[in-house]
Image (spheres, rainbow, N blue to C red):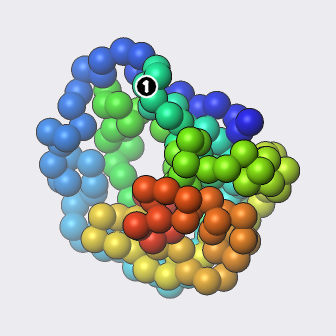
Amino acid sequence: MATAVYPTFYGREPPVDATALAWEDTRPDDAQYWRLVARLKRRGGFFASARLVALHSAPGQDPLLALQLARQRGCYFPVLLLPGALDGTAWQGVPVHLSLCYAQECPPWLVAAAQRRWGHWRRVWVSCSRVSSGATCILGRRGALARCRILRQMHHCGWYSKRELHISL
C-alpha cells in the first residue's frame, strides 16, 4: 500500500477551525498573489518530486490516495499560501498533493499498478494549464502526471472524478 501520511492533528481536535479562515488569512495581499500566479503561468509549470501516498485525515476514515509533491532542490516550486497559514488547522502537516481517489473507491489491481509506478520518489514536470479561482494548479496535458494512464484511471474511480486534476497551492 502507499506510504501513509498523517496531518499534525490526526486523531485530535485542531485548535483553529480552517473554515473560519478568510482568503486574506491564508494568502498574500492581492498584488503579491497575482505576481506569484503570473510567474507560474509564465513558466507553465514546475519540476517536483512525486510519490504515491495515502493521506489519512482522521481515525476510521478512508484515506485519500494522492501523489505527494515536494520541492526539487534548486528548482522553482510555487507557493500561493502565506507561511504558516494553515498552522493549527486540520490541514497542518498535509503535504502539497494531487488528489486521486479514496482507497475504497479504487480497485486493488489499480492501487498495485500505481504503487509499482509511483511508490517511490520520482522527478516529474507538473504542467499547469491555469490557476483556478481557488488557487489550484489545473494540470495541463504535458508531463508525466497528466499523461499517466494509471493516475487518470484512479482519478476517474470516485468522488474526485467530478473535479479536474489539480494541485492546491
Q: How many marks?
A: 1
The structure residue drawn at horizontal position 72% and vertical position 70%, both measured from the top left corner, is: 148
Visible in this render: residue 97? no
As drawn, is 4 to the left or to the right of 55?
A: right
Which percent across, then down, holds residue 49?
71, 54
Front-most of residues 68 and 116: 116
Residue type pointed to by label 1: Ala
80 versus 148 height, above or below = above
Q: Quadrant of residue 113?
A: bottom right
Q: Is residue 6 left or right of residue 34?
A: right
On screen, residue 35 above or below 3: below
Q: Determine the residue located farthest toward the top in the rendered image.
A: 12
Furthest residue toward right: 116
Location of residue 117 with respect to 133 vertically, above or below: above
Left or right of residue 28, residue 169 in this image = right
Residue 4, by quadrant, is top right
Density class for disc 1 (Cα within 10 Å; few <14, some 14-19, many ≥20) is: some
Q: Which residue is more in the foreground, 135 or 6?
A: 6
Q: Residue at x 38, y 36 (%)?
A: 91
The residue under the point 72% across, 71% down is 149
Observer-nearest residue: 54 or 61? 61
Q: Quadrant of the C terminus?
A: bottom left
Residue 162 at x, y percent in the picture: 40, 67
Where is residue 21 shown, x and y percent of the image?
18, 42
Residue 129 shows up from this direction: yes
Rendering coords of residue 98 (x, y %) = 55, 57
Quarter of image, res 89:
top left
- Judging by the rendered image, the residue that carries numbered circle 1 is 58
Residue at 55%, 48% (x, y): give it: 105
In which quadrant will I find the N terminus?
top right
Q: Is residue 18 left or right of residue 59?
A: left
SS state under label 1: loop
